[in-house]
Image (tube, rainbow, N blue to C red):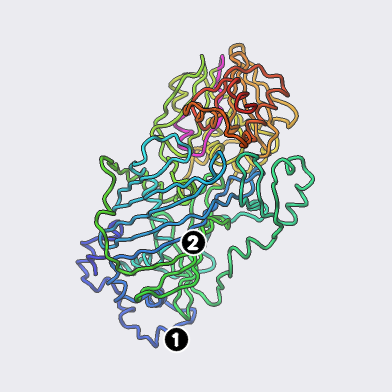
Amino acid sequence: MLKFLSSFYPRYYNRASLSSLGLGLAVSATLMSCTEQSLQTALTDDMTADILAEKAITAIGGRANLSQLKAFSLTAKRSPYMTGQGPIVGTGMLAFPKYEAQITHDLGNNRFRLDIVRQWAAKDGGIDKYESTELVKRQAGYASEDDLFRVAEERDQPMIPERVSAAIKTEELLHPHLLLMRVLQDPTRALLGSEDDPSGRRLSEDEIFPITLDRIRQSGKRELIVTTSWLEKWANSDFYKMMVDKTSVNSSWLERWSETPVSAETHRRLVIQDEVHPITLFVDVESGRIDKLETLEYDYVFGDLALEVYYRDWQVVDGIALPMRLSMTLGGTPSLQVERSNIVINPELDESQFEPPDNVTYVHNEALAERGRRISQNLMAFSRALGRSIKESKPEVIAKELLPGVHLLGSEPFDLEAVYTMVVEQQNSVIVMEPGMSSLKGEAVIEWIAQQYPGKPISHLVISHAHNDHSAGFRSYVAAGAAVISHESSVEFYRTQAERPASILLPDALDRNPIEIELIGVPKDGLFRIEDPVRSVVIYPVAMGHTNDMVMAAVTELEFLYTGDLYVSGIARLLRQDNVERQPGILPFHSAISLHKTIEKYGLKVSKMVGSHDQSLVDIEQLEIYIND
């Protein structure tokens, strides 16, 4: 059994220490002496971690069955959610379409494979199907997947180390019998927890709602689940009319989604030590069933949050118990819902299904893998929803000079975040537009600016809107001394996130160098000028239905516009396909119309534009053709 356990969890296994104590280390003396009767009656407050662990192991299948578990497969329907993508700044969640995954674990060889089919709304109407395969072999990972943004040309790629470790951790969280194997290996890892144990921050109901069930890409309108208080606040606003397709008032939705809370009277906490943060299993003292898991994870926007997994509808298949329904939350917000079927224990395995793509080489980096374990659900949220993960390591900055003194900075290799940062050189300083999601990316951009423009500080950071892929990395720039410019409706949101408690999981530049943030709000009916003898920059608000805090930036002397999320990137991708014309009956995207109206409203003289999700320039005439054709 030791050979089996060490093959599955090499990072927790120490052969010398186990050998010195022999097989007896796999089971403590207390566990060996426990009879079935004593396990059933040991329900008092003086229950030991050994007894509680043994009850959980027995309930999940027992030592004999776990030792004989070499592989398993199942089908899962997964419903992912994402924070940081709501219509109102700093609030709301986006529910992505349910997708199906076929999952196969080969425990003896420490590898697993996920075959996933997603459906996504096509830009010209209808549904596109995206198929992907993720393969993890020990520490290496490979992916064969379609790129939703159609930027990455190659389908077969090595996974980045962060994503590999995030995928491994996610599988552990979703399969609690894998976690109990740690206790089988080393019982000293398991401790009894208490209600006084610290846990991460949980978001309020006002931060979680509304829940976007559907977003119509052409119109920008949303189908929402809202609370009564949310509807009372927003129903009479102009933004509501631009943004809402229909609403369902369901003030108890979150409570029902989370299902029955775990009672402290009927459960004890089994704490498994972990290099990131202790993992707490809530064990029913009567049945030994694990009903809940809790640990701590880092979130790009909110910092350290409580991560919880609820396990429901346990079923026994060939001696192994597995939960058929799971709900994962991050900070109390929905993250992932899972429905399982077709479980097979110890199936026949096809070796060919575990072969990586030809000519694809994985390169491991343990420091980056460790970071991925601390931020796993942020990384996996994009992978679940869209089929490709963001790059969380500090990237190599790839700079492209668009116009004199104006650079667009991307990263290598391509990441899903795909937010290009614009840098404008002024006479005595530098302006940055769009920080993107990762604080490490911000640090890399700041280093590039220091080399490119020595002696010129970053005076201002402009954020187009508060969606996390565009804004969450802003704290790096605050630590560098930049003033933050955003729509007036998002000023307090950025102040709150700049002043949040320092992370214990992933301290960023602002945690290491806490300074007071300087915030500038662009009026909803005004503008903000950064005058300069060489290149002035003017920030304009945009009224639209995507978010209530959108702004764009113009470099006036160059007749150039950075449009953020206003569909210029979509037009750029169409141009690469030599087709900017729309199909009959297909409306132009709402954000392109909002952009055009804003240009006309302010009488802007614009010749060239670039969006935040593509590096290609678009002529103003091409925008007009797209809208009016």
The answer, for residue 504, to whether it is visible in the render is: no
Q: Which residue is depicted at the point 66% across and 16% down?
A: 605
Q: Tell whether label 2 touches label 1 (CB within 8 Å).
A: no
Q: Which residue is depicted at the point 64% across and 55% down?
A: 204
- Which one is nearer the viewer's eye here, 505 or 541? 541
- Identified by mark 2, the residue type is Val
| Coordinates of residue 297 in the picture (x, y in percent) | 48, 53
- Which SS class for mark 1? helix
Q: Residue furthest top?
A: 533
Q: Quadrant of residue 59?
A: bottom left
The span shown in magenta is 426-446
- Identified by mark 1, the residue type is Thr
- Which SS class for mark 2? strand
Q: Which residue is depicted at the point 65% across and 47% down?
A: 222
- Which one is nearer the viewer's eye here, 626 or 15? 626
Q: Compared with residue 489, is residue 274 higher up or lower down, i.e. above or below?
A: below
Marking on residue 448: none
| Coordinates of residue 186 in the picture (x, y in percent) | 31, 67
Question: Is 428 part of what is drawn in magenta?
Answer: yes
Q: Is residue 441 left or right of residue 527?
A: left
Residue denoted by label 1: 41
Question: Is 253 part of what is drawn in magenta?
Answer: no
Q: Compared with residue 439, is residue 600 higher up or lower down, i.e. above or below?
A: above
Residue denoted by label 2: 338
CA gap between label 1 and label 2 equals: 34 Å
| Coordinates of residue 27 in the picture (x, y in percent) | 29, 74
| Coordinates of residue 625 in the picture (x, y in percent) | 61, 24
